[in-house]
Image (spheres, rainbow, N blue to C red):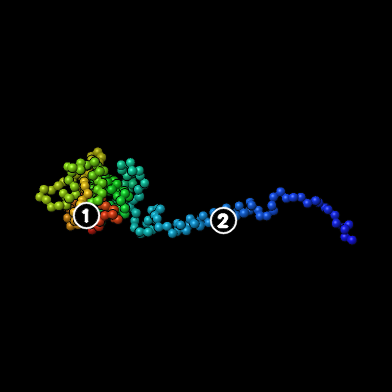
Amino acid sequence: TATGLLNVIQPASLPVRPSSPSSRFYAVVAFALGLVATFGVAVMYDLSSTRFRTVDDLQRAIDLPILAEFPRVRSSQPRLPREATNYLRASVLLATEDVDDRVLLVTSARRGQGATSVAVALAESFARSGSRALLVDADTTNPGVARAYGLDLASDPDLRAFVQPSDEPVDPVAVHVDAGHELDIVPSVGMLSTTTDLSSAKLGAALRRWADRYDIVIVDSGSMISSADPLIVAPHCS
């Protein structure tokens, strides 16, 4: 018989851990797949997003030159950085070197995006450079130039006094910018009842008069979405 031919070479022992599946192997595979999936989702989101994250994104979308870039500032900061504003002034001069009457409109897509801050800073930059600059507040819904300079809302003339025909000419308000430099402004000290108060013909005539008198006229207007002011002002700008 075969009974005497079988011998125990080594006694069997109980395993201390399972031989399969390997938890370490599957953990590494799961981690790698998670990284690939996360990267894929991020790429798909970036390709499908329509937000502008950099200046290059904006320039590719609009195919127009970017005149300047301003950093995000706190609401408590009274003025934009001078370096960025001076860069914008130089860009404006280069872009309008063949223009006789410089009338520049400053607006934004939505309210609260800093159009008034840019207009004020740019006008002051021109004044500091020795140019005869005029800042016009043509925002009929949320005028901010008068607040920026702390003008007396009761005694100072507003935009209507400048654009309405009158036998007595009204002079712009002169404000101090730096030592030896002043800036003329046409404030809008209160909201106009309707945008028709700011008629295109009357404002156009006033802007032409100012363009003959000043080196540059900067018009601060309302936002494109919430106001019709830019549509009224734009045809009269450079």
* Left or right: residue 189 compared with residue 60: left
Kind of residue indicated by mark 1: Thr
Residue placed farthest to the left in the image? 167
Q: CA distance from mark 2 to mark 1?
A: 59 Å
Task: Report the residue marked by disc 2.
Answer: 33
Query: Which numbered marker is on residue 67?
Result: none
Residue shown at 18% from the left, 57% from the top: 201
Q: Quadrant of residue 157?
A: top left
Task: Report the residue marked by disc 1.
Answer: 195
Q: Quadrant of residue 2?
A: bottom right
Q: Position of residue 37 (x, y in %)?
A: 53, 56
The answer to which of 137 and 180 lies nearer the viewer is 137
Q: Position of residue 92 (x, y in %)?
A: 29, 52
Residue 89 visible to an observer of this rendering? no
Quadrant of the frame with the C terminus: bottom left
Residue 24 visible to an observer of this rendering? yes
Q: Residues within 10 Å of mark 1 (few under 14, many from 20)?
A: some
Kind of residue indicated by mark 2: Leu
Q: Position of residue 120 (x, y in %)?
A: 27, 46
Q: Quadrant of residue 232?
A: bottom left
Q: Residues within 10 Å of mark 2 (few under 14, many from 20)?
A: few
Residue shown at 21% from the left, 47% from the top: 190
Residue shown at 36% from the left, 46% from the top: 72
First in sequence, mark 2 or 1: give its number. Answer: 2
The answer to which of 97 and 233 lies nearer the viewer is 233
